[in-house]
């Protein structure tokens, strides 16, 4: 009779299972808060990677979420150990949270690998906390579940709904145009963000929470349950239980994050009118886990996908409405029924994406449209090419003015964001609604950190004529809550010597989104003359993380990761001191 194979020991047994001085050290110090001996009997140890911080208001309820994850881990026979990692808040961090996404991912990766963990639950919420934790966890590749903190309740102002970011932009333009008072502006601040949770428009946080669900790395329902709804806590608890089971099933992250999973996520992003930031983040995550995802995949997969969700900034509703209407499961079902889904993609609950969502109901077709009668047609992210962006640039047609998607205009150039702020309100600025605003030096190296300034506010002299949109081009990003005919992520960026650096006032630029073209109408000879005069900018700080970032950051089309972080090293710790 064949000998029964012993199950492979868990990773954590290398710490807690030792019966020598080091085992004593590992266990004894851990017992100091009342952990009984039986927790070290070889049960799965689940790390709860927490981005709680009072400096990150969107994640300020994460202590409660962590308690619910812990309860789930304990119920399933695991041993939960919560740990903090660098948390990135969109509203307070300067110069931009994106500068620190890669730094936070290093913290996550090393914290997971260096500790006695068999599986991990990632608590994510505010924009950059989702990609940074997924990037770090991908480079280790343990069984992993992500739990989003959930969106805030809808903003309520003088009888109408107002949404994070989207109405911040519109109200600040109204203030600049003299249409509302400062008192009204202040009142709106108190009305917009009135509960725990992240931005409740389909901005970057809600987009990334949707990506978590679409990728299969989160539990069904992850995208939209409001932060303060009891069902968010239930989801956290179920995630804790699943993390334990996933360790037993050896269901590591790379079995979930396949090329098919990313392709599903790209189509879901088109269907929800999701943030352009998802392009950079998904490419960065894919490159960590070892999936070959390119900018061109976004264009290819987004074609023929329609926006189904009527949510700000593309539409009028908010995440709370989205959840009550059926949430992301109803969207995934529509995609699946119309041939736009890899149905067999595996998810963290052990079932396929299709099995999870094939019977999902929709309760409100004004919020979630059908594929046959979409909210907006053919609205996947368009990837542009041309002499101005040989490595690509992107535009989100669902947030743009349709008639501006084919446009030729005179460039009005701002050399950097300071130059923009200095001149934009000048009544003498030579600009009209047909011009194309060009902003340089706001890319990964140029800002540094690739700020969300691509949706430049329009000049007051244009706003006062009732014009609300102009073509804008930059190497920057745009907040997921913003809108307009905004060409973003121009690569290579100006600070890396891209053609954007060579644009001058008065140059003509031609945009044709249907043909995916963005062309600077200047002769190659003239461009060569300008290039000969161009000087590479220096790193803004000569030391520390800023220096490391400047020297190693990749361009937008490569995910803006640091070059030496691409790929994964697994969970093995190469050297043990003991
Ligand atoms: Fe945190 Fe918008 S500021 S999600």
Image (spheres, helix red, strand yellow):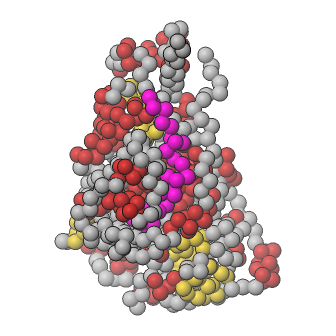
Residue shown at 60% from the left, 29% from the top: 572
Residue 543 on the magenta segment? no
Report the number of discs.
Answer: 0
Residue shown at 52% from the left, 90% from the top: 434
Q: Position of residue 540 (x, y in %)?
A: 64, 58
In the image, is 406 to the left or to the right of 310? right
View extreme (front): residue: 1
Most prominent secondary structure in the magenta stretch? helix
- Residue 154's quadrant in the figure? bottom left
Q: Position of residue 123 (x, y in %)?
A: 40, 43
Q: Position of residue 449 (x, y in %)?
A: 57, 58
- Residue 467's quadrant in the figure? bottom left
Residue shown at 50% from the left, 23% from the top: 10
- The image shows residue 335, relative to residue 136, as above or below, that is below
- Residue 554's quadrant in the figure? bottom right
Residue 262 on the magenta segment? yes
- The image shows residue 235, relative to residue 1, as above or below, that is below
Q: Nearer the viewer, residue 42 or 359?
A: 359
Judge whether residue 108 can be spotted in this image: no
In the image, is 154 to the left or to the right of 89? left
Judge whether residue 61 can be spotted in this image: yes
Q: Nearer the viewer, residue 189 or 52?
A: 52
Q: Nearer the viewer, residue 472 or 120?
A: 120
- The image shows residue 56, relative to residue 24, as above or below, that is below
In the image, is 349 to the left or to the right of 539? left
What is the quadrant of the C terminus in the image?
A: top right
Q: Position of residue 505 (x, y in %)?
A: 64, 85
Residue shown at 57% from the left, 76% from the top: 473
Residues rendered magenta in the picture: 247-275
């Amino acid at each position: 009779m064949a000998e029964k194979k012993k199950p492979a020991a868990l990773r954590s047994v290398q710490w807690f299972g030792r019966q020598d001085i080091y085992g004593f050290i590992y266990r004894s110090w851990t017992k100091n808060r009342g952990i009984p001996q039986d927790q070290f009997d070889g049960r799965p140890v689940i790390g709860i990677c927490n981005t709680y911080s009072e400096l990150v208001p969107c994640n300020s309820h994460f202590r409660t979420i962590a308690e619910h994850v812990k309860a789930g881990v304990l119920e399933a026979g695991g041993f939960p150990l919560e740990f903090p990692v660098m948390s990135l808040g969109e509203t307070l961090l300067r110069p931009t949270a994106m500068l620190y996404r890669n730094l936070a991912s290093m913290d996550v990766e090393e914290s997971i690998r260096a500790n006695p963990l068999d599986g991990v639950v990632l608590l994510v919420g505010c924009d950059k906390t989702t990609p940074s934790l997924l990037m770090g966890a991908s480079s280790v590749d343990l069984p992993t579940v992500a739990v989003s903190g959930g969106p805030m309740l809808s903003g309520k102002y003088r009888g109408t709904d107002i949404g994070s970011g989207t109405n911040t932009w519109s109200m600040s333009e109204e203030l600049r145009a003299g249409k509302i008072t400062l008192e009204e502006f202040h009142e709106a601040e108190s009305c917009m963000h009135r509960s725990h949770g992240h931005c409740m428009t389909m901005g970057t946080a809600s987009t990334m929470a949707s990506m978590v669900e679409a990728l299969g790395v989160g539990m069904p329902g992850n995208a939209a349950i409001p932060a303060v709804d009891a069902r968010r806590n239930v989801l956290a608890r179920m995630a804790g239980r699943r993390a334990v089971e996933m360790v037993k099933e050896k269901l590591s992250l790379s079995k979930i994050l396949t090329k098919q999973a990313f392709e599903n996520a790209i189509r879901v992003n088109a269907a929800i009118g999701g943030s352009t930031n998802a392009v950079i983040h998904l490419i960065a995550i894919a490159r960590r886990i070892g999936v070959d995802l390119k900018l061109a995949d976004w264009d290819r997969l987004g074609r023929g996908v329609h926006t189904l969700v009527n949510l700000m900034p593309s539409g009028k509703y908010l995440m709370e409405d989205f959840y009550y209407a059926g949430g992301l499961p109803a969207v995934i079902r529509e995609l699946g029924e119309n041939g736009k889904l890899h149905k067999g993609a595996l998810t963290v609950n052990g079932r396929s994406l299709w099995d999870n969502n094939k019977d999902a109901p929709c309760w409100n077709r004004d919020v979630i449209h059908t594929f046959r009668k979409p909210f907006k047609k053919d609205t996947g992210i368009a990837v542009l090419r041309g002499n101005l962006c040989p490595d690509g640039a992107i535009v989100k047609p669902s947030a743009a003015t349709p008639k501006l998607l084919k446009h030729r205009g005179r460039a009005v150039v701002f050399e950097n964001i300071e130059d923009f702020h200095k001149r934009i309100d000048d009544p003498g600025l030579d600009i009209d609604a047909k011009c194309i605003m060009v902003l340089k030096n706001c890319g990964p190296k140029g800002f540094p950190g690739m700020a969300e300034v691509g949706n430049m506010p329009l000049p007051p002299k244009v706003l006062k004529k009732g014009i609300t949109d102009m073509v804008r081009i930059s190497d920057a990003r745009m907040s997921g809550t913003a809108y307009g005919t905004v060409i973003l992520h121009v690569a290579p960026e100006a600070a890396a010597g891209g053609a954007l650096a060579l644009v001058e006032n008065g140059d003509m630029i031609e945009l044709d989104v249907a043909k995916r073209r963005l062309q600077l109408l200047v002769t190659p000879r003239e461009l060569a003359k300008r290039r000969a005069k161009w000087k590479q900018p220096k790193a803004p700080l000569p030391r520390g993380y800023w220096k490391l970032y400047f020297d190693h950051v990749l361009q937008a089309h490569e995910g803006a990761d640091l070059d030496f972080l691409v790929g994964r090293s697994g969970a093995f710790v190469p050297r043990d001191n003991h």
